[in-house]
Structures are given as C-alpha cells and as structure tokens.
Amino acid sequence: MTEMVCALCLKEKTLRNSHIYPEWIYRPLYDKKRRLEILSVVPDGRNELKQKGMREYLLCDDCEQKISVWEGYARSVFVQPVTPLEVQREGTILHIGRLDYSKLKLFELSILWRAGVSNLPFFKKCQLGPHAEVLRRQLDASNPGHPDRYGALMFGLKVGELPETLQVITEPRPVRSYGIKAYNLTFGGFLWVFHVLSSDPPQMLRMAFLREDGTRFISVKNALEMRNLQQFAMELGRLGRAPTTR
C-alpha cells in the first residue's frame, strides 16, 4: 500500500493494489500452479507469468469496497447465479430479465472507467478523454445514469459446439460501431462493446443496451466467425424488437 490520491474519490488516502478486472474473471485462466500467462504481442517476445491479474495502485479501501459490491453482483449473474433470471432464447439472441440495473450498469461503467484511467500498457489504447471524468463522478456518486449513455453490447463467445464460453482476456481496442466511437473489451467469456458518446445513440443500439427495467440482450456467437458486430443489432431488428422508449 502507498499514500496517494485515490483515482475515484480524489482524496489522499492509502491506496490498494487494485485490480482493473475483478479477480474472479482471471480464475478460469490460471494454470495448476495458479499462474496467469500473459501472452506477448511483440514478435519473439517472451510470455510473462503472473500470480495475480493486472493490478496497480489506483483506489483507496473505501472505493474498493464500493466497487466490490457491483463486482459481487456481476459475479452472481455471470459465474454463480443466485437470483433466478428470466432467460428467453430466439436463435442466437438471449433476452435476459430480472437484472438489477443499477448494480450491473455500475459494474460495467467501473470496468470501462478503470481501463480508461489505468497506466498499465495493456490498457493504453483505451483513451476516454473527458468521458473519464464523467464516469468518475457517476461512480463516485453510485449513479448508474441513463441506459443510453455508455451502453454496452454483449456477445457470448463460444467455440463450435462446446458448452463453455471462451475464457480469454484481450487488449482493449477502439472501434467504430454505427459511426460511434466504442471500445472492445473481452473478459469473462464475453466481448463487451462499450459506446462512448454524449448524445442519443441509434435505436438499433438502444434496444440491446441494459435497460432500467432490468432487461438486456446478449448475442451468442462463434468466436471464430465474428466478422461484423453490427449483425447483433440487425438480428434484433429482424426479430421485430423495438427499443424501450425514453
């Protein structure tokens, strides 16, 4: 631990060696000796073994505890379901209901924000600019905000007919989705496409974001065949889904 300014509350406190992604995301990736192999992106570079996931001195204990509540809820949804969810499947589209909008949205925003303010080289392509401060204020106030702001598309990653999702963590990278700046973050068996904008997104995107009524769509895709992420929204349109009204 070290005394510095907490990135979230902006108070000078003793900082924790904070995870950017929660520890439960890394667990499926550890080997038998509980080591995590970080693959080098440099040709002929050596891979690196770590005993813990990517961390840095970022948050104070109070802010760690705040975020851990949102992480715990996300874990109860994606890893060890506790509260029964409503799940309907239409082809490759899952319609999920009975989600806690506030906790899940704050978890999503916390991941995007931490990736954007991290000084680790792994996250260097996630540059949020002024949006980082907007997100910091929301998270500090535990305010999930409007569902149309910083919404994420979710893709469940499968390989062929295997029942498990593909557990992989890849370097975040900027993309364009419907002309909107977005970031691809892959973790926890999902590809998350976070849309970073200050105006209203297209309706085709709004229908897929997490909504205040606790519903969201997830597209289950073969990770080896994903070429066009906008196909998700197009499939929703073909199913006759209408976006939730504002």
Image (cartoon, grey):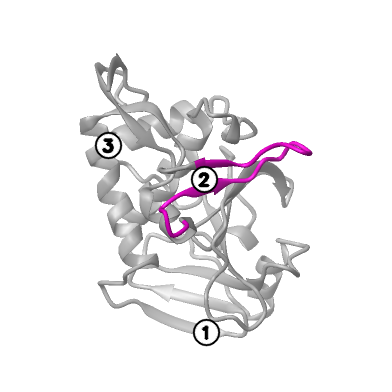
Magenta residue span? 31-49
Q: Is residue 39 magenta?
A: yes
The residue tagged 1 is 89
Q: Can residue 109 be spotted in the picture?
A: yes
The residue tagged 3 is 64
Where does residue 16 sit, x and y in percent of width and height?
29, 29
181 to the left or right of 53:
right
The disc at residue 150 is 2
> Of callouts 3 and 1, which one flags the residue occurring earlier in the amino acid sequence?
3
Q: Residue at left 77%, top 38%?
A: 44
7 to 167, vertically: above or below: above
* Dot 2: element: loop
Q: Nearer the viewer, residue 159 or 107?
A: 159
Where does residue 215 sit, x and y in percent of width and height?
42, 68
The secondary structure that most of the magenta stretch takes on is loop
> Of callouts 3 and 2, which one flags the residue occurring earlier in the amino acid sequence?
3
Where does residue 207 sit, x and y in percent of width and height?
55, 64
